[in-house]
Image (spheres, rainbow, N blue to C red):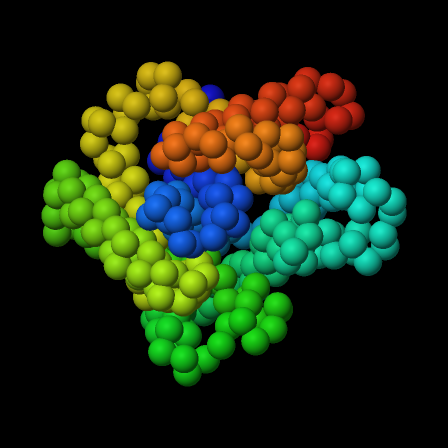
Amino acid sequence: MSNRVFYYDALRAISIIGIVFCHVGIFFLSQGVNNPYLPVTAFFDCFREFSIPIFVMLSGALLINRRESLTKFFKKRLSRLLIPFFFWVLIYIAYSVVFIDHGFNLKNAVDIFFGTSGTLGVLFWFIWMIVICYLGIFAINKIIEYGSKNWQNFDKKFILALIILSVIYIALSEFGLFDPYSSKPLYFISFMTYIVIGYFIANNDYLGDKLSSKVVVVLALIASIALYSYYVFGFVVPQSLLNNHFAYKSYFNLLILALSVSVFVFFKYLSKTKYLEAIEQNNLGSALTLISKYSYGIYLCHYVVIFSLKRNFTRFFLDMNFIISIPFMVICSLVISLVILWALDKIPVLNKFSGIN
């Protein structure tokens, strides 16, 4: 019997789709901000603003407050994370050698491995961030394990303290009193804020104790739409036009935090109604579960798929109305990625590289 939580699957699927939309959107944004399609492109590109935080929040929801040995924790987590990663790094390096650099470039290969901006492997920064966060999660779990032996309700009090510190940290970042981007290690560690917030939302029901699930769903939906609309059309588009380059906010920003929390809360409480249960039983639910299962593999391989589509079909996509071409390119990227991963999953030895969850 499966122990999957469907609203986690829905969130994970929507998040990976949002990340693909972002990376497709970047291609269209390369045409410049002074074009009539900027609002459309910005609308799709900004899906990343809640997609990355939600991915991280799900890690917190699933992994915090688990009692595992250091060996078991890292053998189980890091093997799932790093084995597919190393395989796809080699694919990206080989692709770069054949189609971009037309020869082996050691510096470029190292940059791809570490997810350096401006390289084909730019997306791999996320993997190193997750590795750092796993270290943080293990440390939190050990503190909870020790504290719970000596103090009653230590886990709840400790997590609540971390939540307060996380919100303060993000507020300090927003108001320019602290810079999470001053170094890569600090930037990666900063995502621990979303780790603890994800655990807190998933494992506490303060809203449900005071309001019905349907009311929370409606309020969270309204908040998500309002915050996202304001962010895209009240900040990104006007600021991009004003500065003549694409403008966006940091992940460590109160608006982005509120947006990510609203989306997470919406799906959590939707799962307590008959509506998400109905979706789980139909074709849409099956599609979301499939995408969720392959979400890590999709993350690893989709960027090279998008790059190939751009390289071979640039004019085809750019000559269409962006309202059509961006979603169409996203669908193409997702389908091709899923086919590649499905094929890998069916081949002995290679199936360990599919990243299936």
x then y, percent, for residue 327: 42, 32
Q: Is residue 315 left or right of residue 209?
A: right
Q: Residue at x 49, y 62 (%)?
A: 191
The correct choice, above or below, for 343 with respect to 302 in the image is above
In the image shown, does 277 or 67 lie closer to the viewer? 277
Can residue 241 be seen at all in this image of the molecule? Answer: yes
Q: Residue at x 44, y 30 (%)?
A: 320
Q: Quadrant of the C terminus?
A: top right
In the image shown, does 241 or 12 lie closer to the viewer? 241
In the image shown, does 114 or 146 lie closer to the viewer? 114
The correct choice, above or below, for 55 with respect to 12 in the image is below
x then y, percent, for residue 319: 47, 32
- Name which quarter of the figure residue 354 lies in: top right
Q: Is residue 208 left or right of residue 64?
A: left
x then y, percent, for residue 271: 28, 34
Report how many numbered discs are placed on residues in the image.
0
Can residue 43 be seen at all in this image of the molecule? Answer: no
Q: Residue at x 47, y 68 (%)?
A: 147
Q: Is residue 115 left or right of residue 141?
A: right
Q: Residue at x 59, y 53 (%)?
A: 126
In the image shown, does 145 or 185 lie closer to the viewer? 185
x then y, percent, for residue 135: 61, 60
